[in-house]
Image: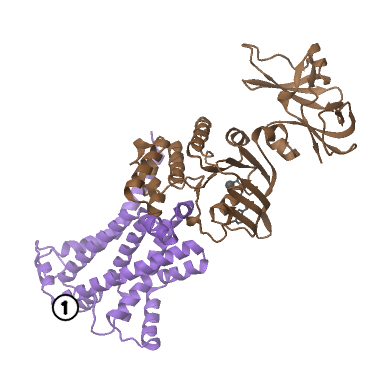
């Protein structure tokens, strides 16, 4: 049976973590709750309504922004998944520290730095008109590292002789990749892709720097709305965004449980 | 012409020579074993035969053809890895069919070969299981089946029984012998367990520090080791410093330190006065109290110092009058009589003149 001292300690541990989780989730919960509030103000609860979601669905600008966001996220996460997977395999295969370092730097670098440097690069170096393309390139840049790290973690967990066995049993390097390596890293690839998608959908800072005028994404649109007033429509769109992000994270963790356990 | 031929093969890692000028001839249908202590280069040799590694010098020939430019997937050689290396995302049947699929063997024929191989290793009821659902012995058999399914010329086995417990190991040894006989594929087997090597092989190459010390049949390796290392590595043996005194009556007289003069079998090409080691197996040393020992050419009085009861046999350590300590082994064949002598008993030990070997230095 538990000694009473340990019981007390257990209680405080519980209480503290409860506090931390409350701190993390109560603001989010308030956003969700007020998206159903039948009032123009986020001040007091008046009554339940779907009204703000209805407003959202008829807001042309908002819908365009959502469309852009989904398009950017899909294209950038697909490309980042392919490139990141290749980078992850190379990192594992050649074990070159510099490769790992280079793929991870964009992950750790302050977003504002990345945003500014990409902006300068696009405008001054390659003379690219800012818009969808520049946003997509920017998003690929910061997602590759995540995909690569997840794929490499997957590979590191596989017995190296499995790949030799495939060659030994008559598979060419390409057949080994197709029948053995790829199926084994697939969960990591999918998890990495979902991560990249989530990161892209949510990104504000880097997108802000690389979007130029004319093209807006969901986070940019929300930002420009709250500059005027925080209406419950912002709550509604935030709620939907939260739902999408959560789904992605849950899916990613399903495919590759290590991702959420911080094993990467 | 031998099936597989290694000619002066050398492999260096940095300035360390892992395989040093090794030459071997392995015949078709043979169960050939590389035996040696950890780190002596056994795995490195297998990896070069399989094609995962290349020699720095020398050649590896299969059917007389140099393999240097043949990638692993094109060599008719298969490997059973110590870790089994089964594909975790494939069932037993898919694992075993993998080489058939790679060789593009048509479905009907492939199915037949799969079926036969499953029967061969008694795994028909596990065809749809995944590797993580199998026991160690079953995984082992899948790895064997996968290696044998499209009948390679050579099967390389790197300590395949290493991960199994003692009982299963013995069972698998018998299975391996039968399997090899049945399929007729040449086996190159790697182990550092000498008992296993003796039990399984047609021929054994004993290795030490990247070099081959002796290649021979198990009984000759055990009975006539040619170097101190081989004598010591395989089984137990008494070793005493010795010098050739003179040939007498068609037999040799040796001066053995701590023992005195002994008679031994004729030795060829050994000059009088040459120094070396006299080595004799404990089971060749007879031990007793009465006259029957005195009738042997070599016999010495001594005192029992220790004994080690091992169930089937008892090992006695006898210190002799002139200082040598000799181990003698006595089988416990008579029921209830495991302890024939006690510590401190005065005994005689002796051996026939043709027992034991002189190892020239
Ligand atoms: N890729 C490598 N790089 C550097 N040294 C190596 C490499 N592969 C093997 N060696 C060295 O070569 C020597 C022989 O290795 P090998 O694996 O062939 O030994 P082994 O006889 O199979 O030993 P064990 O019974 O322990 O498996 C060892 O000292 C090992 O450290
Ligand atoms: Mg080895």
- Residue at figure coordinates x 16%, y 78% from the top left: A61
- Viewer can see residue A218: yes
What percent of the width, then of the height, locates residue B173? 53, 33
- Residue at figure coordinates x 13%, y 77% from the top left: A60
Which secondary structure, mark 1?
A: helix
Residue B355 left/right relative to B200: right
B191 or B252: nearer the eye? B252
Q: Colour of chain B?
A: brown
Instruction: Please name the residue that numbered disc 1 is placed on.
Output: A61
- Viewer can see residue B260: no
* Quadrant containing the C terminus of chain B in the rendered view: top right
How many C-alpha atoms fall within 10 Å of the one at disc 1: few (<14), some, or many (≥20)? some
Q: Is residue B318 above or below residue B32?
A: above
What percent of the width, then of the height, locates residue A211? 29, 81
B326 or B171: nearer the eye? B171
Q: Colour of chain A?
A: purple
B112 or A183: nearer the eye? B112
B359 or B316: nearer the eye? B359
């Amino acid at each position: 049976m538990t000694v009473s001292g340990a019981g007390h300690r257990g209680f405080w541990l519980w209480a503290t973590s409860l506090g931390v989780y409350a701190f993390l989730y109560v603001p989010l919960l308030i956003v969700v709750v007020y998206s159903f509030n039948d009032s123009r103000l986020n001040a007091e609860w008046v009554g339940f309504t779907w009204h703000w979601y209805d407003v959202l669905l008829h807001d042309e600008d908002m819908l365009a922004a959502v469309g852009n966001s989904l398009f950017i996220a899909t294209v950038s996460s697909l490309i980042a998944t392919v490139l990141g997977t290749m980078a992850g395999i190379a990192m594992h295969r050649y074990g070159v520290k510099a490769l790992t370092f280079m793929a991870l730097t964009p992950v750790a670098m302050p977003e504002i730095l990345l945003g500014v440097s990409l902006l300068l690069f696009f405008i001054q170096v390659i003379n690219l008109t800012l818009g969808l393309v520049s946003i997509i390139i920017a998003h690929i840049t910061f997602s590759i590292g995540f995909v690569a790290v997840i794929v490499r973690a997957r590979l590191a967990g596989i017995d190296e002789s499995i790949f030799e066995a495939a060659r030994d049993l008559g598979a060419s390097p390409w057949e080994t990749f197709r029948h053995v390596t790829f199926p084994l890293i697939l969960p990591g690839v999918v998890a990495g892709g979902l991560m990249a998608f989530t990161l892209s959908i949510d990104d504000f800072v880097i997108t802000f720097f690389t979007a130029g005028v004319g093209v807006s994404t969901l986070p940019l649109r929300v930002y420009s709305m709250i500059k005027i007033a925080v209406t419950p429509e912002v709550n509604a769109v935030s709620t939907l965004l939260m739902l999408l992000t959560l789904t992605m994270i849950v899916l990613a963790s399903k495919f590759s449980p290590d991702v959420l356990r911080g094993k990467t | 012409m031998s099936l597989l031929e290694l000619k002066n093969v050398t492999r260096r890692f940095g300035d360390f020579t892992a395989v040093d000028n090794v030459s071997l001839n392995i015949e078709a249908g043979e169960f050939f074993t590389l035996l040696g202590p950890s780190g002596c280069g056994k795995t490195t040799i297998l990896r070069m035969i399989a094609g995962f590694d290349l020699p720095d010098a020398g050649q590896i020939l299969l059917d007389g053809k140099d393999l240097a430019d043949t990638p692993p997937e094109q060599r008719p050689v298969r490997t059973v890895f110590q870790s089994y290396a089964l594909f975790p995302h494939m069932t037993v049947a898919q694992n075993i069919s993998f080489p058939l699929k790679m060789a593009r063997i048509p479905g009907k024929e492939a199915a037949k070969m799969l079926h036969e191989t499953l029967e061969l290793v008694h795994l028909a009821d596990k065809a749809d299981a995944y590797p993580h659902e199998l026991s160690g012995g079953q995984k082992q058999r899948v790895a064997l089946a996968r290696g044998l399914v499209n009948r390679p010329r050579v099967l390389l086995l790197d300590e395949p029984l290493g991960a199994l417990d003692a009982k299963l190991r013995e069972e698998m040894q018998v299975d391996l012998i039968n399997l090899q006989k049945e399929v007729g594929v040449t086996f190159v087997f790697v182990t550092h367990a000498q008992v296993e090597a003796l039990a399984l092989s047609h021929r054994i190459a004993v290795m030490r520090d990247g070099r081959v010390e002796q290649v021979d049949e198990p009984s000759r390796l055990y009975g006539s080791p040619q170097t101190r290392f081989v004598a010591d590595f395989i089984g137990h043996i008494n070793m005493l410093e010795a010098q050739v005194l003179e040939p007498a009556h068609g037999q040799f007289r040796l001066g053995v330190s701590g023992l005195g003069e002994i008679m031994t079998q004729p030795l060829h090409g050994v000059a009088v006065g040459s120094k070396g080691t006299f080595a004799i197996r404990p089971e060749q040393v007879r031990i007793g109290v009465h006259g029957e020992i005195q009738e042997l050419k070599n016999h010495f009085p001594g005192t029992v110092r220790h004994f080690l009861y091992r169930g089937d046999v008892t090992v006695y350590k006898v210190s002799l009058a002139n200082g040598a300590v000799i181990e003698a082994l006595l089988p416990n064949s008579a029921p209830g009589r495991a302890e024939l002598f006690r510590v401190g008993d005065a005994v005689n030990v002796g051996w026939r003149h043709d027992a034991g070997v002189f190892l020239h230095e």
